[in-house]
Structure formats: C-alpha cells, structure tokens
Amino acid sequence: MQWEKLLSARRLGSEKIPDGIAETRSEFQRDYDRIIFSSAFRRLQNKTQVFPLPGSVFVHNRLTHSLEVASIGRSLANKLFMQLPKLELGIDKEYFLGIDYLVATACLAHDLGNPPFGHSGEAAISRYFTHGAGSAFQGKVDEMSWTDLIHFEGNANAFRLLSHQFNGRREGGMAMTYAVLASIVKYPYGSDSFTKGKYGLFCSEKEVFSSIANELGLIKKSDAPLIYARHPLVYLVEAADDIAYQVMDVEDAHRLNILSTAETEDIYLSFFEDEIFIQKKDQIYQQVTDVNERISFLRASLINYLTDLAILVFIENYQKIMNGNFSNSLVSCFKGKASDAMKKCKEISFEKIYNHRSVIEIELAGYNVLGGLLNEFLGALLEPTSHYARKVMALIPVQYKPHSNDLSSQVRGVLDYISGMTDVYALKLFQDIKGIRF
C-alpha cells in the first residue's frame, strides 16, 4: 500500500479530488468539524459507555469516551509523524501533516454506530432475530441481510451512518473523505466472513467500501467473500480506543468506589518498568494530596507511556502493516511488564467492573427496552395494513424511510432509527408506546 493513495482526500459522493498538501490537510480538518457538529455525535452524550448514565458522580459516556479516544489518537498520529524519518519512505514529511486530524476524526466517529445501552444493545438486537419475534423475518429478507441482522454489529453501523444516503439527505451520507472512512473500518469485510462476532460492513455498504478501498489501494485479500487488508491508520484508531477504555474504565471504577485507591494505584503502576517514574510519582505525591488528582496523574502518565509503546510496535511491524500481513492489534503486541499488566487489568475489569451490579442492570434494561421497541416497529412491518401498524410506523422520522419498498430495506430503516436513539430517548419512547407514562 502507498501513502500517496492512502491519504486521499476525495469525498464520498463527489468526484473532485483536492490538489496540494495544504488543501488535503484542510479537508481532514473539515471532516473533524463535520463530526463534532453532527447530531449523531451529540447523541453520544446520552449513550452508555460502561456504567449507567451519571447521577451524583460523573463517569464516562460515549461522547466523553470518543473525545478522549480522539485525543489519544491525535497523540499517536503526531508520534508516528515524528518517527517517519526512521522509515525512510522517500516521501516529503510534510505530506503527512494532516494525519493528526485524520486519525482524530476516525476516533471521534468510531462509536457512532453503537445502539443504546452499550454493547448489550448490539446483543439485544441480534437476540431479537435469533430468539425473539424477529425470527419471523428469516426467509422474508435476503440471505445476506439476515446474516447482518442476527449478528448486528456497531462497527458496521458506524460506516453505514457515515456513508449511507438517508432519505432527503445528500449523496455520500456525511460526505467524508475516503481516507477517514477507511480508517474507521477495523474489520474490512462483511458478515459473511466475520470471526468472533466482529465485522465492519453490512451487505448494503460492501459495494461502497469496495470502491473506496480500490481508490485508496487497499490490498484485496479475498474476492469471495470480499476481504480487504486494513488501512494502516486503523491500527492507530484501534490502539487509541484500546488504551482509552482500558485505562479510563479503571478510573471510573475508582470514582464509583468499585476499586479502592490502593487497588487503582497498583493497577496503573504495574505497567511501569522505569524506576525514574516511580521517583517522579513520589515527588508529585508530596505536592498533591488530593486522591482523585493523584489518580489522574497516574492515568495521564500511563496513557503517554502506552502511546509510546504502541508507536514502537507500529514501527517494528511497519512492512507487515503496509503489506497487509499484520493481524494483531498494537496493544496485543506489548511486551514485558506492560503486557502482563494489560492482561491483569483486563481480568480485573471483567471481574469487578463489567460484572458489577449497576452494569448488569443497565444491560438487562437494554434488552427489555430495545426488545420492546423492535417488537413494536418491526411487528408493524409484518402487518402493514392494520390501523395500529400505520400509527406505529408514523412515528418513524422521514429520513429513515427507505428508498425502496422491499422488506430488507424497511427492516434496515427501522434499525437505523432505533440504533441511533439515545438511552434516554429509547426508554421514554418505550414507556410512551406501552402506556407506562403519558
């Protein structure tokens, strides 16, 4: 793969290709602003990250998480930029000046497709079709659409949200640059070739992604099923996300008293091998006595340390990445104490954080609320002539009405509507329809 193609600023829905380095860089800045000011991004403030939406103690939601991932992604891109001379690419270094905005934009957008109630929302949608009333759609929608439905994937939904021309909207969806669109696709293949429940493209967007991939020169690894190698900058976006949620979930758990201060300090300090940092920590602690500020210092130091390690892994595996032969995440390739600490951190997270009662309660609520909404709206598709069904379908905004009348497109339109809801809106609509509140 060649950077001259990979950093293309052509926009989806437009044939115009900006000329010159400065204009290319400004195009990625426009992408960043376009995401920041979008309604889809604003809705992330009322979508669960891990813990329920905050009460007296503020913890992360999808919006704050995405902003922090973007900050880490920008740092990773800048550190890669500083390492470019070591790679001897034979390309003017200034050509890469825009990758900080490019990576940060992809980071901002990486969770746009997640439905309400965290990852349990994805599971709730899938379960509706595998074990709920949605099983009635099997055989009534096309085979590829059915595979997408029973394995609903937020990653694929993010690409659809950015690229699909919703009713009444412009061609190309949000008209993002090809480079940004490719950089959010962690799994550049469809549900017909996914592993471990992860894929990056619904069948409805595979053709669009294929045209983008060919324009950027992404390596095609298989024709049937269609599989591409990742855009190299995907590895930075993925690393930013991995670092953010692993480190920040621990800080949230400390804020909520799920982890003690001693436990939190032990987790963070277990990553460091350098005794000089321990000495620096002791000096900071002499000045700073506030417990939360001490934890914030450790968290910030750890993020900086992990981004340095991630870039080292990227540089070490540069040729494999550019040849499409690198199959790991950057974080999974950490060595020594950092590797052991990351594994231990994940174990503690699953034991004490992701299985905490408050987390389980919001997941169960998500199953019931989303299951109820899917029953109402998709049930209406199965008996469209009934008076009740017409009333229910009238609630769907016009932008989610499909361009065609085939059942697969109609089901997809309902999922576009429901998956875009915030936790609060989904709960309110569920209560309103069920008559729980007036």
Image: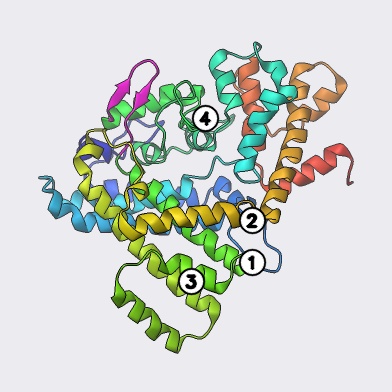
Q: What residue type is labelled 4?
A: Gln
Q: Which of label 4 and label 3 is nearer to you?
A: 3
Q: Which of label 4 and label 2 is nearer to you?
A: 2
Using the numbered discs, state the Cα–Cα distance from disc 1 to disc 2 in whole angstroms: 10 Å
Pointer 1 or 3: first along the chain: 1
Using the numbered discs, state the Cα–Cα distance from disc 4 to disc 3 in whole angstroms: 48 Å
Q: Mark 4 points at which residue?
A: 165
The reply to whether the magenta stretch includes residue 144 is no
Q: Residues within 10 Å of mark 1 (few under 14, many from 20)?
A: some
Using the numbered discs, state the Cα–Cα distance from disc 4 to disc 1 in whole angstroms: 42 Å
Pointer 2 or 3: first along the chain: 2
Q: Which amino acid does label 3 sit on?
A: Glu
Majority secondary structure of the magenta segment?
Answer: loop
Q: In this view, does 267 lie above or below 91?
A: below
| Label disc, if present, on residue 265 of the rendered structure | 3
Using the numbered discs, state the Cα–Cα distance from disc 2 to disc 3 in whole angstroms: 21 Å
Q: Which of label 2 and label 3 is nearer to you?
A: 3
Q: Which of 235 and 250 is in front in this view?
A: 250
Pointer 1 or 2: first along the chain: 2
Pointer 4 or 1: first along the chain: 4
**Considering the numbered disc 2 on the image, is that residue within a helix, a strand or a loop?**
loop
Chain part drawn in magenta: 218-231
In the image, residue 326 lies at what x, y percent? 28, 37
Q: Which of 385 and 185 is in front in this view?
A: 185
